[in-house]
Amino acid sequence: MSLAASTRTPLEVVRATLAVFVTLAGVSCGLTLLYLGMRAVMDIGGACASGGPFVPRVECPEGVPLLMIGGIWGGIVFVGLYLWTTSKHRVPTLVAFAWPALFLSLGWNFLDYGVDPPVGEGLVWGWLICAVLFALMGGLPLLAMVKPVLGQFGRRAADVPPAQVVVPTRSKVRQLRAASNPGPRGSQRFGFDPKPGGPSGAPGGESLVDALERLGALHASGALSDDEFEAAKQQVLGGRG
Amino acid sequence: MSRESAWWLLVQLAAIAGGIAFGVWFFRAVTT
C-alpha cells in the first residue's frame, strides 16, 4: 500500500503498524478479560472469593481472579505502551476511547444483570444504579471526545484553512506603529509606511527583511494577533511590491 | 480522509477486533 502523504520509509510503516497493532490489541484484550471476568462473577451472584485461610461462601470460577487482575494491569500497561507508540510514530490515537470503553462495557454488565439477575428475581437496584453511574462516567467523556479523536483521521493538508487576509485599517496600523516604536522614525524603523504606495522610510531589501523580522518578533511575543500580523505583513509586502 | 489516515484507522480497528477475539479465546481457554 502506498502511503503517499507520509515521509516514512516502508520499514518504518511496517514497524509502526506492528507496534500500534500489538499495543492496541493488548488494550482491547485487557478490557475483554475484565468484561468477561466481571460477567463470570456476576453469574454467581456478584461476589466471590478464593484462596486465603478462610472457606469462602462462594468460590470464584477457576482462573477468573487471575484473568481479571491480569486484564486490569495488562490493560493499564498496554494503554501506556499504545500511547507511547502512537506518539512516537505520529499516528492518530484512539487512547481517549479507552476510558469510555472501560466504563460503558462494565456499565452494560451492570445493566444486563441488574435487569435480569441470574440469582434471584426482579430488578437489582444496586446494579442498576451502578449501570447509570458507569454510563455517565463513560458516556459523557465519549460525547466530548468523539469529534476530536475522529477528527485526527480526517486531517490533511488540503483541510487546513487558508490564512485569513485582512485589510488593515488606518487606525490599526497606527496602533501597530505606536506599539512597536513610539519614536518619530517609527515607520522607518518598522520598515513600512501605512499608506499604500506612500513614501517608505527605509528602502532596500535589507530593511524589508528587518521589517518582517520585527513583525515576526511582535507576533511571536503575542503583541500582534494572527490577523494583525497578516495585515501588517501584507502592508509591508504590498508597499514594496 | 487521506490514504494514510484510512490505513491507521483500519489497523487500529483490526487491532481492537483482534484483541477482543484473542481475549475471548484466552478467557475460555483458561476458565473451561
Image (tube, coloured by chain):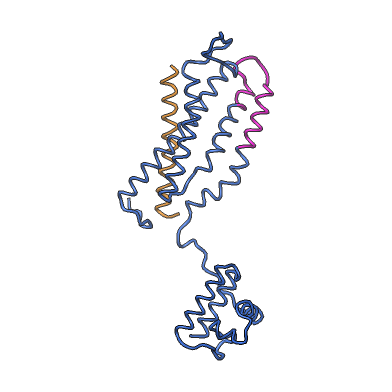
What residue is drawn where x is 47% and y is 15%?
Answer: A62
Vertical side of B17 occupied by A87: above or below: below
In depth, the one of A227 and A113 nearer the eye is A227
The percent position of residue A120, horizontal first and vertical second, equals 64, 14
What residue is drawn where x is 64% and y is 80%?
Answer: A178
The percent position of residue A63, horizontal first and vertical second, equals 46, 18
In depth, the one of A3 and A69 nearer the eye is A69
Which chain is painted in orange?
B
**Residue A78 occupies which quadrant of the picture?**
top left
Q: Does the magenta stretch include residue A115?
A: yes
Vertical side of A162 occupied by A38: above or below: above
Hey, which residue is sitting farthest bottom in the picture?
A: A199
Query: Is A85 positioned to the left or the right of A118 in the image?
Result: left
Span of residues in magenta: A110-137
Q: Chain A is drawn in which colour?
A: blue
Q: Is residue A186 magenta?
A: no
What residue is drawn where x is 44% and y is 26%?
Answer: B24
The percent position of residue B17, horizontal first and vertical second, equals 44, 35
Query: Is A144 positioned to the left or the right of B16 in the image?
Result: right
Majority secondary structure of magenta residues: helix
Query: Is B15 positioned to the left or the right of A132 in the image?
Result: left
